[in-house]
Amino acid sequence: MTIKIVMDTDPGIDDAAALTMALNDPQIDLKLITSVAGNVTVDKTTKNALKIVRFFNKDVPVAAGAQQPLIKEFEDAARIHGESGMPGYDFPEDLGKPVAKTAVEALRDTILASDEKITLVPTGSYTNIALLFSEYPEVKDHIDRIVAMGGSLGMGNMTSAAEFNVFTDPDAAKVMYQSGLPITMVGLDITMKALLTPESLQKLPTINETGRMLHDIIIHDGDNSAQGIAMHDVNTIFYLLHPEAITTRPMWIDVITDGPAIGETVGDIRGAYHNGKTNADVCVDIDAAAFNKWFLDEVASISQP
């Protein structure tokens, strides 16, 4: 049985790797890709999504989304992902075009047309998701769950308090966490543990052309260390396919929308402030070795374009 998903994304290096897995794993039925401003501007994230779809010759629609956050001034991560958002590999130039609909319209139509409930997988800022819920709240009845990359129970990676995706549009994150839908928070608490190791990175280009493509863009990631490179967004796909490798903990998540801690996700870890209620399953631990093995096995299983 396949999992029907929609990915809302801002490619971005690790987003491109997540799209690679979602487009090719037979257990996932990717119905739609929507782009959002995040790692780079939305014109670039849209183009990068089209590049990945074209690379694998897949027939998955791409819809361009929000150009800026709901309220907060936009701040990208080009210092990490490069000016194009996905440097290092010469992709085909004969790209398709995004669909004529906006991301919100495409999300609404895809979700309502599905014969099964859809899983939303946002791996960028949540602006499109917030706009969707605000304009078309009826879609919530047709969504199974949200598996969202973002947030942290501890230190952030954009500020000392905030993870980048939530920081980019904290007001949208607040809307999402108040939606009443089941949410899994795939945050820095696991993505900084499941680093793609130097050994795994070295093997990638020897596997096939997909491995070479991923290797060539991943080595341009500005957020790396001697221990490895965080493939933040890929953890959403790993969780969907191998939840047994990830430990989650239910809790209530609040989002800070102003002040010096803007973008912080505050977990009620003691269950002390919301009368025992929870609004998310928070990923708190991961089998990093299993993640690395899965990543390489996935690449090896992909039929080459």
Image (cartoon, rainbow, N blue to C red):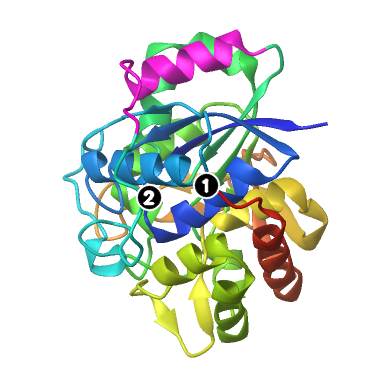
Instruction: Relative to 218, say whether 175 is above or below.
Output: above
Indicate the amino acid at tag 1. Leu
71 with respect to 250 (left or right): left
Do the residues under discs 2 and 1 have CB atoms within 8 angstroms? yes
Q: Which corner quadrant holds the N terminus?
A: top right
Check residue 105 for magenta coloring.
Answer: yes
Residue 156 in the figure: left or right of residue 239: left
The alpha-carbon separation of the residues under discs 2 and 1 comes to: 9 Å
Looking at the rendered structure, the kind of residue marked 2 is: Pro
User: In the rendered image, which residue does mark 1 sit on?
Assistant: 19
Q: Is residue 210 left or right of residue 296?
A: left
Q: Secondary structure at mark 1?
A: helix
Point out the stretch of residues depicted in magenta.
Answer: 96-114
Q: Which residue is mark 2?
A: 11
Can residue 271 be seen in the rendering of this structure? Answer: no
Q: Residues within 10 Å of mark 1 (few under 14, many from 20)?
A: many
* Residue 110 painted magenta: yes
User: Where does residue 291 sit, x and y in percent of width and height?
Assistant: 70, 67
Q: Residue at x 47, y 14 (%)?
A: 108
Relative vertical location of residue 9 with respect to residue 228 in this rendering, above or below: above
